[in-house]
Amino acid sequence: MSATPPEPSTPARQVPPKSILRLAGRAIGDFDMIREGDRVLVGVSGGKDSLSLLHLLLHLATYAPVRFEVGALTVDPQAEGFDPGPLVPYMAALGVPYVLESQDILEQARQHLRHPSFCSFCARMKRGVMYRVAREQGYNVLALGQHLDDLAESFLMSAFHEGRLQTMKAHYVIDAGDLRLIRPLVYVRERQLRAFAAAAGLPVVSDSCPACFRAPSEREHARELLAREEASNPRLFASLLAAMQPLIAAGSPGPRAARNRPPTRSGPLNPRR
């Protein structure tokens, strides 16, 4: 495995637009996500969000004031219709250390669950595989591609169905204490990532989560509700971000506290050009 950051001249590399770089850089700075000498493993599902995150971190590694390495991991749940095979030559072209790990997660879900949605079970199983591979390969940070829309949906689902104010955290140490988990895209909108992936021609794997796409989910209902509300309130997500800031920052091991306002300024890893 390479011990140096990938070369920026690799033909397959794509540079995200400054709008994404600014927001991700600010989140990284706000929550102290990346530190000197970190080895960051990106969980790449094959979807637009995780592929965008991989290109973002590869680009940041070329000019950030701290040195860090980037690798990638795909967990194949062996679901019908999901073929991560094209990612193998793509990662080779990127020059990224890559692990493709297969595990029959959906079959295990069918054996142990009685309801049609496998999302929570699959997510837990995938996370366990990611932790194991990160340890085996010597990574100390796991980076995931959830964005602001994901956080808002989780916030609504938690309030509506569990009676709790909760959402995904930006940066925390896992229970075992040996790995940190980061989400650099917590300030970035899904539509920004969709536009970048399309413009850059990223090799998005269709049906990266086939079981979830075929079954109605609480998350889909939350997504539709947010879309309807945003149509009449363009500042909806700015307001939601301000409301969620304490929840996003909860448990963050970084010395810097996230600011309780919508992201508008660049962070310390952002280009100033």
Image (cartoon, grey):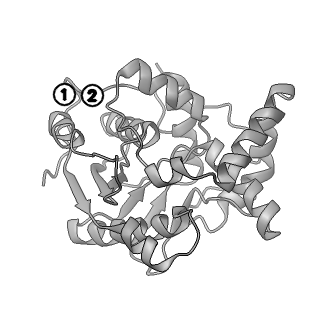
On the image, numbered disc 1 is attached to which residue?
10
Q: Which residue is drawn at 30% across and 57% down?
A: 76
Q: In the structure shown, which secondary structural element does the residue marked by tag 2 occupy? A: loop
Q: Is residue 37 something that shows in the picture?
A: no
Q: Identify which residue, 29 or 140, lies in the foreground.
A: 140
Q: Where is residue 134 in the image (x, y as percent from the top left)?
A: 29, 66
Q: How many marks?
A: 2
Rate crowding at label 1 as few (under 14), some (14 to 19) or many (20 or more) other CA atoms within 10 Å: few
The type of residue carrying mark 2 is Arg
The residue under label 1 is which amino acid type?
A: Thr
| Residue 265 shows in this picture | yes
Q: Where is residue 263 in the image (x, y as percent from the top left)?
A: 68, 36
**Residue 62 falls left or right of residue 254:** left
Q: In which quarter of the image is residue 108?
A: bottom left
Tell me if mark 2 has few (under 14), some (14-19) or many (20+) residues whose alpha carbon lies within 10 angstroms of its own.
many
Which residue in the protein does label 2 denote?
13
Query: Which element carries disc 1, helix, strand or loop?
Result: loop
**In the figure, 57 relative to 123: above or below?**
above
Relative horizontal placement of residue 145, taking residue 115 as reference (left or right): left
Report the residue that reaches farthest toward the right. Answer: 232
Q: Where is residue 10 in the image (x, y as percent from the top left)?
A: 18, 27
The image shows residue 221 at horizontal and vertical percentages of 72, 47
Position of residue 103 relative to residue 227, above or below, is below
Name the residue rendered at 32%, 40% in the picture: 61
- Nearest the eye: 228 or 239: 228
Q: Is residue 126 left or right of residue 254?
A: left
The quadrant of the image that shows the N terminus is bottom left
Query: How far, Cα to Cα, is label 1 from label 2?
Result: 6 Å
* Marks 1,2: beta carbons within 8 A: yes
Residue at the image point whose x is 68% and y is 31% from the top: 264
Which residue sits at x=52%, y=49%? Answer: 214
